[in-house]
Image (tube, rainbow, N blue to C red):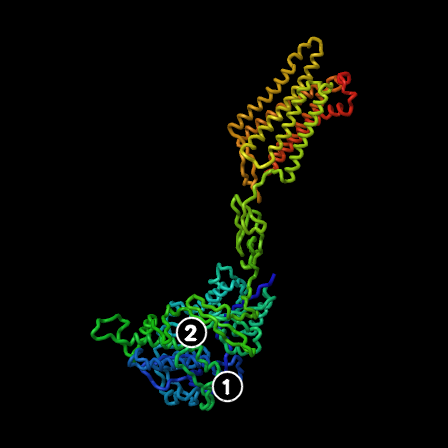
């Protein structure tokens, strides 16, 4: 069996993502309380100024304690071009809104952007600086293009107070901003904070975001797992709210769907090297280590240009399938980047900064500015003088006297159409889910490129499956299961102490089927049906009965026919030698009648073989009961005649034989037999045996048998045969030592002993035998008892007639 490939879901926060640093960029740092806030200022003042807080730079991961104090240590280094592009998008959106006469007419919008440098104290300082309009003492060195940086004089005079802040480049930063500014009702609109915790309006009533909550990302990943039938998944998450809440949402989404997490490894920023080694070891030792791994990337790193360009991870990262922040193009948006002297440009160069065709964080920032502008528009709109008064949300406010609480109320009601034609609105703190589905493909030159292969709108997946390049290099979807799906004909049996995705496949028992892959239960077939050999379908049961075509039927039929032939041969011998003393002794007429009854006994066995019908069911029991009573009646009369003949030879008993002449003998046989005929007639008239399909016997066949509608009738028939047999045995036993050379009573005694032994053994064997074998037992008892009678009674006589003719004389028979 092929080992399943392991699917790794990696949800690592953008807080620990790789960043690009551009060396040689000089900075202007404004100091206050021992911290620094870098400012990316607007060129002109405006009626309303919105604040922006971005992590334009990042600090190095290792700091030498020798240089932690100024002027030696500058913790704000390494330019983040994606964030810089988002800042430019904010500037572009403000300028575009100012040119639009339909939004904020007569009101000029402007911006004030600060760099928090990914340091939480700077986040707080920057937030208070923006809301309070604090004055900073600054150096005069430029950080960015001169047109966007205020000179010393402008910085010294202090910035304006802003009514809202666009910022929060991480979930942690957004939490800090929202909790800090909640008491002031200052709205915070984040473009990258995706922690599900931020959707809680009770904890974060002033928070909004233009990126979907990670709940939707987790649901999207769960949908992908279900779409590709992946049931055995490992997860690596960051040990913070971003990662832990996301994996919790993922687990909630897959609950009850048959998808299991093989492991969950959490990594922390502070112990990233240790945690990464542990996570790698877990992946290597997972149960699916034989085959390749397929990585599913979260939006935090699915579009990372640093990873795409890293040669060291080329073999691992090829084929990565990821959920990304939805991309869009802002018409007319272009970026410039001046370095060092301000005279060099990268215009025309192809890099992450100049690429404006697939904007992600920048487009989210663009939407945030438009959301703020539409909220301000609703707040500052004045009702027409001639119209009736509108609600409080339409009261006229001054752009120089905007209250945070009113602006917060209007942000909750924002609903507009973006310049790209999309409808935009907030659902609480969130926006409807929208993602790109991306794939890391290998280019002809060996490098990795990011390819858009689908989108997510709401919870609907739009995916081009045929364009996906998997980690295996094949176009086939990789397998990711703990146990292969159980084939039809088997059922799943969970392994004790293991996840539900790990199971064994147990074959269905006889009479049960499963016709689907991965069945949890086998279903029992209807009574008239049985499972096929593969246990995948119910097929009609084959009707089973004792037939002439099977071995046991052939053997029993042969035995019955042979009995008839032997009995006929004896009949012919007796007919040929009917004048000899052996044949004439003890009434030859009874001997011929006995042979005829034995023929009937052998023939009645044939009636039990074959497909039961209404008439065969009635005939077989009647023929059996009457034939054996006729046979035993003949033997009984023979025994009585022997006893009467012996008694008549005594003095004074000469008249005894007149009561047992030939007429009386025939009459006695008819009397005993007529009683059985009456019993059978009553039984078959009131409650005869009928053909019956026995479904209670579980098997692939339906047993067709003659069911005893009245057990009492059958018992009476057997009981009468048994009574006559016991009476005959008793009489024969009394006559066994009569002083004749050839005493027939001895042979009758032996024959009746055999007869009784056979039928005593028959009863338990008949009851315990299933199906057609009960019929075979009854036929065997008929043949055994018939052969016993035939051999015991007639074998000695035939021996004398054919082999010892000298003993076939009256003197020899009557000799003492």
Location of residue 680 by image quarter = top right
Q: Which residue was labeled with disc 1?
A: 23
Q: Position of residue 241 (x, y in %)?
A: 47, 69
**Residue 40 shows which numbered tag?**
none
Instruction: Please state which of residues 263 and 173 is positioned toward the viewer in this rendering.
Output: 263
Residue at the far front: name it: 576
* Lower sequence index among marks 2 and 1: 1
Residue in the image at 33% along x and 83% along y: 46
Residue at the far left: name it: 386
Instruction: Please state which of residues 443 and 791 is positioned toward the viewer in this rendering.
Output: 791
| SS at circle 2 | helix
| SS at circle 1 | loop
Task: Examine the rendering and report whether any part of residue 463 can be seen.
Answer: yes
Q: Which residue was labeled with disc 2?
A: 174
Is 290 rendered above or below residue 785?
Answer: below
Q: Position of residue 163 (x, y in %)?
A: 34, 77
Quadrant the N terminus occupies = bottom right
Local packing at callout 2 (Cα closer than 10 Å; few below 14, some 14-19, many 20+) is: many
Quadrant the C terminus occupies = top right
């Amino acid at each position: 069996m092929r080992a399943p490939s392991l699917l790794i879901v990696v949800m690592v926060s953008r807080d620990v993502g790789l960043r690009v640093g551009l060396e040689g960029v000089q900075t202007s740092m404004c100091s206050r309380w021992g911290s620094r806030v870098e400012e990316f200022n607007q060129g002109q003042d405006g009626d309303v100024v919105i604040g922006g807080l971005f992590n334009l730079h990042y600090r190095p991961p290792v700091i030498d304690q020798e240089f932690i104090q100024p002027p030696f240590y500058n913790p704000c280094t390494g330019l983040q071009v994606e964030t810089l592009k988002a800042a430019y998008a904010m500037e572009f959106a403000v300028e575009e809104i100012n040119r639009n006469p339909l939004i904020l007419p007569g009101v000029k919008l402007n911006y004030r952007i600060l760099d928090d440098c990914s340091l939480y104290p700077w986040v707080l300082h920057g937030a208070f600086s923006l809301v309070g309009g604090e004055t900073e003492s600054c150096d005069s060195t430029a950080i960015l293009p001169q047109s966007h940086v205020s000179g010393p004089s402008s910085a010294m005079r202090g910035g304006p107070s802003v009514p809202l802040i666009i910022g929060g480049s991480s979930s942690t930063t957004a939490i800090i901003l929202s909790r800090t500014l909640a008491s002031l009702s200052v709205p915070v609109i984040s473009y990258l904070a995706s922690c599900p915790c931020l959707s809680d309006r009770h904890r974060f009533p002033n928070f909004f975001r233009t990126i979907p909550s990670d709940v939707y990302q987790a649901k999207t990943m769960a949908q992908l797992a279900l779409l590709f039938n992946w049931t055995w998944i490992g997860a690596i998450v960051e040990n913070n709210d971003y990662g832990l809440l996301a994996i919790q949402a993922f687990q909630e989404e897959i609950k009850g769907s048959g998808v299991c997490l093989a492991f969950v490894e959490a990594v922390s920023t502070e112990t990233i090297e240790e945690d990464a080694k542990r996570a790698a070891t877990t992946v290597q030792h997972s149960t699916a280590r034989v085959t390749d791994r397929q990585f599913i990337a979260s939006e935090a790193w699915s579009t990372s240009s640093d990873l795409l360009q890293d040669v060291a991870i080329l073999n691992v990262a090829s084929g990565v399938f990821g959920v990304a922040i939805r991309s869009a193009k802002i018409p007319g948006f272009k970026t410039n980047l001046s370095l060092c002297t301000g005279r060099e440009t990268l215009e025309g160069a192809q890099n992450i900064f100049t690429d404006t065709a697939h904007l992600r964080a920048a487009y989210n920032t663009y939407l945030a500015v438009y959301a703020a502008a539409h909220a301000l528009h609703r707040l500052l709109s004045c009702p027409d003088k001639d119209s009736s008064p509108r609600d409080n949300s339409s009261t006229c406010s001054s752009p120089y006297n905007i209250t945070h609480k009113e602006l917060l109320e209007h942000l909750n009601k924002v609903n507009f159409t973006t310049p790209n034609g999309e409808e935009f609105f907030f659902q609480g703190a969130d926006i409807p889910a929208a993602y790109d589905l991306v794939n890391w493909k290998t280019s002809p030159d060996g490098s990795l490129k990011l390819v858009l292969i689908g989108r997510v709108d709401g919870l609907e997946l739009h995916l081009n499956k045929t364009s996906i390049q998997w980690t295996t290099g094949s176009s086939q979807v990789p397998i990711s299961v703990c146990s292969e799906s159980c084939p039809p004909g088997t059922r799943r049996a969970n392994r004790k102490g293991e996840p539900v995705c790990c199971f064994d496949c147990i074959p269905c028992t006889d009479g049960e089927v499963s016709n689907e892959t991965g069945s949890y239960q086998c279903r029992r077939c209807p009574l008239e049906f049985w499972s096929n050999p593969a246990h995948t379908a119910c097929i009609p049961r084959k009707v089973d009965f004792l037939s002439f075509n099977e071995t046991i039927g052939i053997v029993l039929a042969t035995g019955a026919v042979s009995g008839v032939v032997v009995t006929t041969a004896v009949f012919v011998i007796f007919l040929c030698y009917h004048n000899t003393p052996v044949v004439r002794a003890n009434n030859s007429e009874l001997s011929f009648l006995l042979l005829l009854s034995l023929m009937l006994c052998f023939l009645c066995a044939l009636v039990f073989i074959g497909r039961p019908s209404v008439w065969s069911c009635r005939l077989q029991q009647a023929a059996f009961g009457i034939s054996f009573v006729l046979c035993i009646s003949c033997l009984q009369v023979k025994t009585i005649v022997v006893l009467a003949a012996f008694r008549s030879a005594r003095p004074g008993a000469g008249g005894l034989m007149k009561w047992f002449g030939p007429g009386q003998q025939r009459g006695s046989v008819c009397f005993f037999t007529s009683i059985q005929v009456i019993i059978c007639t009553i039984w078959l008239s009131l409650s005869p045996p009928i053909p019956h399909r026995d479904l209670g016997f579980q098997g692939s066949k339906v047993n067709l048998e003659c069911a005893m509608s009245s057990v009492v009738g059958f018992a009476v028939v057997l009981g009468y045969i048994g009574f006559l047999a016991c009476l005959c045995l008793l009489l024969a036993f009394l006559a066994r030592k009569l002083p004749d050379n050839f005493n027939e009573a001895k042979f009758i005694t032996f024959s009746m002993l055999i007869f009784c032994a056979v039928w005593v053994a028959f009863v338990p064997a008949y009851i315990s035998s299933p199906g057609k074998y009960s019929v075979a037992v009854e036929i065997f008892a008929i043949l055994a008892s018939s052969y016993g009678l035939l051999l015991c009674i007639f074998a000695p006589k035939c021996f004398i007639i054919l082999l010892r003719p000298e003993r076939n004389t009256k003197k020899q028979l009557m000799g003492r």
